[in-house]
Image (spheres, helix red, strand yellow):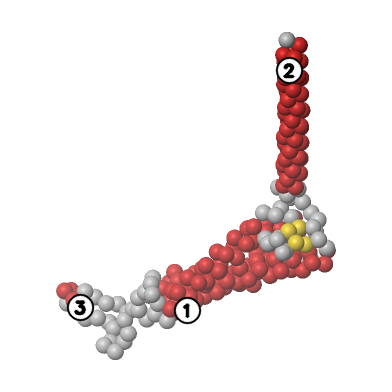
Amino acid sequence: MAHSQHEHHHSGHDHMEHHDMSQADYTLMNEGINSTLRQGNGDHKSHASHGSMMAMTFHGGYVETILFSWWDVKEIGPFIGSFIAIFIMALLYEGLKYYRKHLLWKSYAGLQYCAVAPPDKGVQNICSPDEPQVIQPTMLSGAHAYQTVLHGLQVFISYMLMLVFMTYNTWLCVAVVLGSATGYFLFGWRESVVVDFTEHCH
């Protein structure tokens, strides 16, 4: 009987030790999970803090990442160079728009028009037999393909300038506006000549 009670007491003691070890393991596991969650929350806050550093309002300064990760400006010298580069980009964008209109003007200037009457009207055509008729542009022509490439380049530059403006850096925005205004000053006055010509061609 005493031996049985001793075994029962020993068994109960082992059960309590097993229970205590399980409780300790459970406590350690909870501490590990909480530590991981705190660490993850800290990383999230750090990431959120880093994201909030991107100003969404107009600001000055010369520390800026422009368009690409490698275009990371942290000194005044490279920032001035970036200002000039963006200025030239905006200027060339206006020049590209005029150049496309100039090519269109040349295409119209190369066309020869003559009055052609329908055959059933009994009116002789004004064009002489050896005079070329109106040349209709085609979709697969080299001139249209060239214009298509220029159009794609124009769209690309326009989006790049838009993204530069979206940095909200006041100086870079000024570079875009000044470059565009200067480009229009240099090339825009010729557009009235092109528009006047095309309006009188029809």
Q: Residue at x 59, y 60 (%)?
A: 159
Does label 2 or label 3 sit earlier along the sequence?
Answer: 2
Q: Which residue is mark 1?
A: 106
Q: Residue at x 79, y 58 (%)?
A: 63
Q: Which residue is mark 3?
A: 123
Instruction: Identify whether 21 is placed above or below 201.
Output: above
| 168 or 134, nearer to the observer | 168
- How far apart are the alpha carbons under marks 2 and 3? 130 Å
Element type at marker 2?
helix
| For the residues bearing labels 1 and 3, Cβ distance under 8 angstroms | no
Answer with the quarter of the image where residue 184 lies.
bottom right
Residue 188 in view in this figure: yes
Could you tell me the amino acid type at mark 2?
Glu
Residue 144 horizontal/vertical position (percent): 44, 74
- Disc assigned to residue 185: none
| 148 or 202, nearer to the observer | 148
Q: Which residue is mark 2?
A: 7
Instruction: Judge the density around disc 3: few (<14), some (14-19), many (≥20) Cα neighbours within 10 Å.
Output: few
Image quarter (top left, top right, bottom left or bottom right) of the C terminus: bottom left
Element type at marker 3?
loop
Q: Residue at x 24, y 81 (%)?
A: 125
Does label 1 or label 3 sit earlier along the sequence?
Answer: 1
Residue 69 horizontal/vertical position (percent): 70, 61
- How far apart are the alpha carbons under marks 1 and 2? 110 Å
Could you tell me the amino acid type at mark 3?
Val
Answer with the quarter of the image where residue 20 lies.
top right
